[in-house]
Image (cartoon, rainbow, N blue to C red):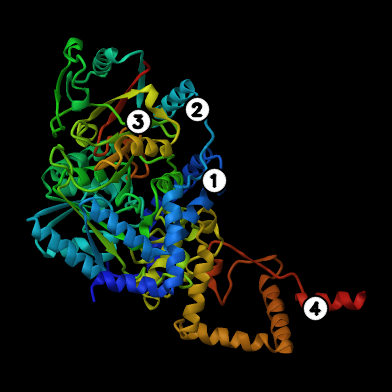
Amino acid sequence: MEIKSMRFKANASASLANVVLQGNLKNAKGKFVTKRAEALKDLDDFEGTRDAAKAIRNKVIDNLDLWLERFERKALDTGAHVLWAKDGAEVCRLVTEIARKHGVKKVTKSKSMLSEEAGLNQALEAAGIQPVETDLGEYILQVDNNEPPSHIIAPAVHKSLDDVADLFHKVHGTPRKTEIPALTREAREVLRGHFLTAEMGLSGGNFLVAETGSVALVTNEGNGRMVTTLPKVHVVITGIEKVIPTLEDLSTLMRLLPRSATGQSISNYFSILTGVKKPEEHDGPEHLYFVLVDSGRADVIGGEFHEMLRCIRCGACMNHCPVYQTIGGHAYGWVYPGPMGSVLTPLYAGIENSIDLPHAATLCNQCGIVCPVGIPLPELLRKLREKQTDAGLRPLTERIGLRLWAWVAQQPKLYALGARFGVRYLKWLAGKSDRISLLPMAPEWTRGRDFPAPQGKTFREMYAARRKAA
Amino acid sequence: MSSRDDILGRVRAGLQRNAGNAAAGREIMQAAMEGRIEGPKPAMDTAPAALLERFRVKSELQSSTVEVVAQESEVPAAVARYLAAMNLPTTAVVQPALAALDWAAAGLKVEARGARDADLVGITGCFCAVAETGTLMMCSSPDAPATVSLLPETHVAVVRAARILPYMEDAWNLARAELGTLPRAVNFISGPSRTGDIEQTIVLGAHGPYRVHLVIVEG
């Protein structure tokens, strides 16, 4: 997928000015938060479960090479093929080759963010193979000129009922429907035909189980089951960090993933797929391929962002992020939005391509609090900011400004003089009021809120005065 | 260099892999595989009647409907009653595992096979059920094709009360004991298929069944 993260500020401004989007975001933001909080109630020991989940993920990423070899061996034993891809281009090449080998003309896809990373749909189309997104949200986006997703769990969360009604009326040529069940039924009927005729199904993988060589898929719509049951070929595209040890570990993680993502105690379907159809079986794919993808992950291992590899892609961090809630997912400019995206995009797509993302956070730590595997997201964002500064990647004005500030801060007398001037200037600016409604140096800051006016003297002046009095 | 070697090589470099920490890593791995460590689980009354009750309550929360019958021979009549009450067709596809029940006596026309697109009602058993979340565990096999619980708009599942287990962990242990290895597809099913992709409004019947009806056999 094309990286548009360099245009974060412009994209965010456009999102803020988009009245329809603001309405949709406002409508969406409370629901995820409330549902998650409700769903956590029947988990007696959320903290303990989270500690266990964190330990499971650490166990794997701390010895990832060994676990990958173990998973590969088990998967091969079940009759699956295991392929490795260094980057998105290799994912596209491998999947296209598999499709050609089996004479595939149509691929039904259940949601895979890695396929978005790789730009796989475009590659398949270029090879004359038709990719069909079957997750309702992804389907809506695909028929809307391949619009990118704005959320990893609810890809079309930025769209309203009206948007979808107009879209389906246009692309399906059917009378415009205004009820959500009717629109869902319409998509179901269109997609059923594709499920039955595709020769290849493509899915992501929520987890890879080392014990059994299986892939685990967490879905609600049933499309994940369709694409892994009906076509003769099933291809799993998944990141190398997704391995977990045992089926027990799968159960522990499943107590957290659906609750954190959609506020469900369990997803509607949870499928653990192992190997291929046996000759006497009625259904299931005859060929199963795993494509284990690096795309930047291997280089994160063992470094200062190692902990990010625990991520299980639930989306809770973005659902609870005040910045995401306000600007939506598109402004982030790549596959993963919100706090996890602001860490992953610089790591996987280049820190120089996403200068503003580590700053697209207030570091309020809502994300860190809700993360089901305890990733210290604000800390990682701060480390990225440091790296940018060390590498001289920040804008010239900011660099000069910070250097100037650092110099002044090291001159106590000058600093005190500056502070005294500033405080008196702001007090003068406020006049009789105790608030300032427009800051001349930073007008954006006071758009929609007032700046509290200083009430007299600086801290150092008051401190000195009190010492003298004492 | 192959991509596999390149990727694993960089992972090893990141982990500063050497003979010593490889041996330590293998021990951790072995302990994890043998230990099968279970995480914290929500407390539950595991008396059989309490399990059945919890399973029923949780299933209904997932939008399934539930009927309890005393013995297996009552299942076809119970299914027929449900289909009539819902104004649904009396023709169904049934998993071969349940073919021996006397469906005809209850006025139902069933075919034992995998499901096709045109099938409107699918009747299945289940490998076991999980009380914690109100979940069916389906294990695919020639006798239990995965399509029967997926393609039809109505899914009726027969659940033996004795096979309602407290937790998913118990289901894995039962599968290990009875099946040895996992079947091609284990599908945990919790209610009818659903989507919330338009304005986060939950709609039942996304791509799979619109309704799931459970007939629990006590005896």
Compared with A199, A65 (above or below) is: below
- Residue at point 24%, 39% (across, down): B207
Mark 4 and mark 1: Cα distance apart in space: 48 Å
| Residue at the image point whose x is 20% and y is 11% from the top | B106
Residue drawn at x 35%, y 57% as measured from the top left: A150
Under mark 3, the amino acid is Cys
Amino acid type of disc 1? Phe
Q: For numbered disc 1, what is the local secondary structure?
A: helix
**Quick check: do tags 4 and 3 share a chain?**
no
Left of A347 or right of it: where is A174?
left
Residue A46, disc: 1
Q: Say which quadrant the N terminus of chain A sits in.
A: bottom left
Amino acid type of the residue that numbered disc 2 sits on in the rendered structure: Thr
Assess disc 4: are there few (<14), some (14-19) or many (≥20) residues with their C-alpha within 10 Å of its C-alpha: few
Q: Is residue B97 left or right of residue A207?
A: left
Q: Which residue is mark 4?
A: A461
Please tell me which of labels 2 and 3 falls first in the chain: 2
> Which kind of residue does numbered mark 4 sit on?
Glu
The reply to whether callout 2 and callout 3 are in contact (CB within 8 Å) is: no
Looking at the rendered structure, the number of numbered marks drawn on it comes to 4
Q: CA distance from mark 4 to mark 3?
A: 74 Å
The reply to whether label 4 and label 1 mark residues of one chain is yes
Cα distance in 3D space between marks 3 and 1: 26 Å
| Between marks 3 and 1 in the image, the one whose residue lies nearer the viewer | 3
Vertical placement of residue A413 versus A433, above or below: below
Tell me the residue that label 2 is attached to.
Answer: B46
Q: Residues within 10 Å of mark 1 (few under 14, many from 20)?
A: some
Name the image quarter holding residue A355: bottom left
Real-space CA distance between mark 2 and mark 4, rounded to the nearest whole angstrom: 69 Å
* Residues at marks 2 and 1, CA–CA distance in whole angstroms: 21 Å
Q: Secondary structure at mark 4?
A: helix
Residue beneath label 3, please? B128
